[in-house]
Image: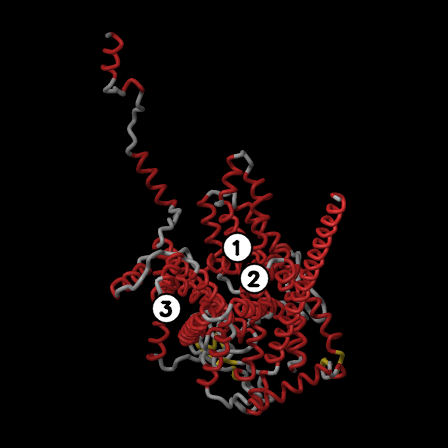
Amino acid sequence: MIQYIYFFIVRYISKRQYCVTKFLENKKTGVKIMKIIRFLSYYVLGVIGILLISTSPALFREGSFFNVSSYFSELQMLVGSILNPSEWVYFFKGNPVPLFEHLWEPYRYSMIVFFAGIILAVVVAFILAFGTMFLPKWAKSVVERVLNLLESIPDLLLAFCLQLFIVWLYKQTEILFVDFAAVGSEKIYGLPIIAVSVLPMIMLYKVILMLMEDEVSRSYVQMARSKGLEKSVILNVHVLRNIMKSVFYHSKIIIWVSLSSLFIFEYIFNMNGITTAFFNDFRPIVTTAIMLLLFTPFFIIYQGTEVFVFKDDDASDHINWKMNTFVGSGYSKGQGNKSFKEIMGEVGAHFKNVKFLIGFLVITTMLSISLVYTFTADPLVDQFFHIYEDNKLVSAAPHSPEFVFLGTTELGFSIFDQLLVGAKYTILFALAVAFMRMIIGFILAVPFAFFLPSKLQKGMEKLIDGMHFLPLTLIAYVLLSPVLLMPMGGFTTTEFERILYQGIIMTILVVPLVTILFGNEMKLLMKEEFVMSTKVMGGSSVHLIRKHLLPHLSSRMGVVFGQQFIQTLLLMIHLGVFNLYFGGTKKTFAPFQNDPPTSTTFEWSGLIGASKDSLMTGRWWYIIPALVCFVILIVSMQLIISGIKEVQQVRVGVPIERTNWWRKLLQNRKAKRYRPSWEPEPEDFVFTHEPDIERRKQG
């Protein structure tokens, strides 16, 4: 009887286990299917966005401004062309050839250069970051300042410097180590790979070093040290393994920035890559194909890893941590309503910071001089055709700096005057775009963080995250070229309309990313204890935003503003290289005139675009002054960002270590100067309790 009962129990349990196992297997299969569907849906949404961007030039066809009917007809034709493979053609020198067959070779060339540069950047960044962990604090500070300076150099100037360095080496040694430009259909790899790797290497190096320093401060590292493990073992076995996932998420933005730089390097090094294919046939179907070729591999790498490898909540946690690390510097508790005096005191604290003050004064001075010059000078830009000395012609346009300060252009216009006139446009436009990105992003972040359900928030994050797989410069060129490039019959829009449209496009392109940035920052703040207490006490959403979120996000908004200012300047440089100037690009269509494209506003990116080939002709004064001015602007804003972070750290009680080595040197010299000549001996000291000890011994 007992055996029968035991048999039925075992059979019942095994049957239940089988049902549970089948249920779990079905559930896992269902989860995998849902992941595949979600992955494909994100890709389809990205493709739809590419189609909408590719047909945007139709909005300005036939001299119209925002021609919606023309846009939708063009979109319909593009979809029809995609569904009909016989229309997948590329016009190469006027002859139709198969589209993807023609694009594959330049695309393969560009991707080899790009991925080789990224791999080189990753390897060098890890090696340098690992070695920096063994340096003293003062050496780390020096390395950080050098990196900030290198990061402020525009990629265009970097490419020119590399080319000039190779030419200089050739003149000194008569050995051409690497080719500095491609000729005809030949392919060069060495110098473009090095150029592509520099900027991501610097950014990755700073990210890895920051992550390693944060990881070293954790408790398990202290325990490993107490057990006697060497620092190299701890870094290799524990720290590097724990930061790899964070490095993966940070690399997404680095790839996004590097893709835009790839177009600049291909243009400067005269490479027959995907950039050349893009400009030789600017039809919507070609633009769509090129964007899909660029979008697909990076989408598979990043979105595939996040969907199929990492857990669903890993991405948001790492993204939140990333933004909290880069944008913020900790939370200060107990901030509530502040009086006007307290607010002005906080603003004044920034001006007491040396870095913030220097950066602010430099930008303000450049802007003030430009405005004063614009209102007082007549003419705004002097033009020098010929220069005579003692009734003898000594120079004809273009004039070198030997005859005119900073030289002139081919048409005789003074470079210095153009810099003075264009400074106000460059600075004010970059400030306006950065401000609008920050304000609109913050306003949209409020409903995103407070009112949208979590599933919808994650969906929007994934959708907007796909923007990191498309070069920002390419999208901006497609959207802006129909308006900024002067057509054959002249401009049909006013200069104000072109500036307004350019500002709107350059703002909208980055607003979604800034919205997610502030939205995730708000969600982090909502998890703080003081916010939870306010919600328990019945505080409304408006109360939370006004009295808690705004005081905490004020410093972060300043940092985001500075970052967007720098990003806008770099985008303006990229557009200038491709002859898209601020306010419009004037062209000459006369049959016997070959004047270069000129800017309607003398803005700095126009100076760079009109003279991008000047270094190869020896006329360095065409472009170097404008690039130096851009570097000064970027470095000044970096100082402002660093000053804001330091003020915020002091406010929340985080100590700031400053390596003022000259002060320490003076203190050491002063200490040596007043050090007594005699050294104390033990018998020189008399202890007051010794007599009591002697009496006790005798008694």
Q: Image quadrant for the N terminus?
A: top right
For residue 562, which quarter of the picture? bottom left
Report the amino acid beneath label 1: Val
Sequence-first tag of 1 and 2: 1
At numbered mark 3, what does the secondary structure look like: helix, strand or loop? loop
| In-front residue for pair 201/397 | 201
Q: Residue 540, labelled with which disc?
A: 3
The residue lying at 56 percent from left, 41 percent from top is 234
Sequence-first tag of 1 and 3: 1
Sequence-first tag of 3 and 2: 2
The residue lying at 61 percent from left, 54 percent from top is 122
| Residue with the mark numbered 2 | 254
| Residue with the mark numbered 1 | 207
Does residue 630 show up? no
| In-front residue for pair 496/489 | 496
Depicted 296 relative to depicted 16: above or below: below
Depicted 609 relative to depicted 682: above or below: below
Residue 134 screen position, x and y as percent: 52, 42
